[in-house]
Image (spheres, grey):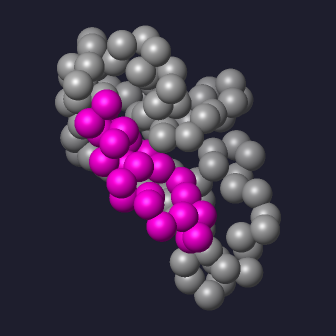
Amino acid sequence: MLIVGYFSGKQRDWAALMDAAARALEERGARVVGRIVQRRGVSAGGARKMALPFSSRTLLTYGKVREAAALRERTNADAAVFVGDLTQRQRRVLTGMLGCPTVSLADALASGASGASG
């Protein structure tokens, strides 16, 4: 499975949050095959947009969604797990765009994630 995180540029512990998510999933039998991170407000252009919401459809930029879809295809990941919460609409849109089931970390952990291999 892929782990996907989206974070404000002000959030300094994003790497630790991604590591903790990977550990939690692996402890439940999942195999993490890749990670995608979208950080907002890191560049000068992004800093001006920090007050704006992430895409309501995907939470990510279109380019980052394409990057995640390409990584999913290369690794044959069977799911994408977002560190943050997703709405029903976001899960549906991202599932279609990424070509695999897309869930939040909380949902993956609640379901056990044990059947997920990649």
Question: In this image, 13 relative to 27: left or right?
Answer: right
Q: How many marks?
A: 0
The residue at 73%/73% (across/down) is 49
Give 5 or 21, whichever is nearer the viewer. 21
What is the x, y in percent for residue 66?
Answer: 46, 53
As rendered, which of 38 and 69 lies closer to the eye? 38
Which image quarter is the C terminus in?
top left
Q: In percent of the image, x 23 and y 25: which residue is there? A: 27
- Check the image and report above or below for 67 versus 88: below
Residue 68 inside the magenta-drawn segment: no
Residue 43 drawn at (x, y percent)? 56, 83
Up the image or down, 4 lies above or below 41; here it is above
Residue 67 lies, in percent from the top left, at 41, 56
Q: Is residue 12 magenta?
A: yes
Q: Quadrant of the N terminus?
A: top left
Q: Residue furthest right?
A: 52
Q: Position of residue 42 (x, y in %)?
A: 55, 77
Q: Which residues are magenta?
A: 1-24
Q: Quadrant of residue 99?
A: top left
Q: Residue at x 37, y 49 (%)?
A: 18
Question: Which of the pair 79/49 is nearer the observer?
Answer: 49
Asked whether the viewer can see residue 73, the reply is no
Is residue 26 positioned above or below 6 on the image?
above
